[in-house]
Amino acid sequence: MRKLTLIIAFISLGVATCYAQRQEDVIYLKNGGITRGKLVELDSTKVDVSNTIGIRTRMGNVFVYDKTEVERTGVENKYRKERYFKEKGYYAVVQTGLLWGRNRYGIDDPRSFLRVTQGYQSSKRWSTGVGIEISAPHFQTIMPVHLETRYAFNESPRSTYISANAGYIIPLDHNVGRNWRDKEIGGMKFGASIGRRLFISDGTALDFSLGYRFQKLTTILQRDNFWPFEDNFISGKNIARMHRVEMNIGFYFN
């Protein structure tokens, strides 16, 4: 019985200690100011302790107030600062991701990409920016450039958002072989996604999204007609329309 009593007392002491560590003293001033920390005893040789009150903050600073300045004091749970992000101003998003879908040749061809978007955040909900991306679909490397708009459903540091983008695909190489000289001229792209933004520090958030992308690539074909001893090419045009699912992960900065 004595052992059980000691165990209960030890557990109760631990719980009380943890709870005390989660609380702090608070001084509310008449001018609207708030100071949090731990009330301290003042040196009676330096100040009039009957008319003053002192508090030490978590940073170690001691503030002394005349009691006529104080509206009230109290004990509250420790204040946890919310992750900070600006309401307006410059922002940037760096993402990497995967594209799933068939390429221009009808082959299932998952591909990775790297994207950087920079722009202006007009409020905690709306932002618009310009993005540039490097990706490598089958047989060629392309650089999509697009305009993106985002809308967050709430103004908290943890928010779900939707985005839409539209732009143009710039080809970075061409398909050239012994008997063909294909010239890539690119094409339009657009897409939409839904994502989640989670701030992990002041001005920095993890960014996840899942979306859909449509892109069109146009190729001017020049193929050898295979007549012997003749350098005679037959020209044509190939337009590929690709529908893909994309998954992104990255960082949001503002």
Image (spheres, grey):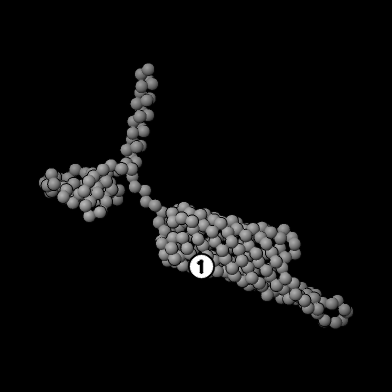
For residue 71, side relative to residue 110 (left or right): left
Residue drawn 45% across the image and 58% down it: 204
Question: Residue beneath label 1, please?
Answer: 129
Is the residue 56 above or below the residue 140 in the image?
above
Quadrant of residue 142 in the image?
bottom right
Q: Residue furthest top?
A: 1
Is the residue 74 above or below the residue 86 in the image?
above
Quadrant of residue 236 in the image?
bottom right
Quadrant of residue 21 in the image?
top left
For residue 28, side relative to residue 231 (left or right): left
Q: Inspect this view and state whether residue 206 appears.
A: no
Image coords of residue 4 (percent x, y): 38, 21
Q: Secondary structure at mark 1?
A: strand
For residue 27, side relative to residue 197 (left or right): left
Residue drawn 87% across the image and 81% down it: 229
Image coords of residue 39 (percent x, y): 23, 44
User: Is the residue marked by circle 1 packed among few (<14), some (14-19), or many (20+) residues within 10 Å?
Assistant: many
Residue drawn 71% across the image and 63% down it: 103
Image quarter of the N terminus: top left
- Label total for image: 1
Q: Residue furthest right?
A: 228
Is the residue 138 above or below the residue 36 in the image?
below
Q: Residue furthest front?
A: 153
Q: Inspect this view and state whether residue 69 appears.
A: yes
For residue 71, side relative to residue 168 (left or right): left
Residue drawn 28% across the image and 48% down it: 36
Image quarter of the C terminus: bottom left
Amino acid at the residue labelled 1: Gly
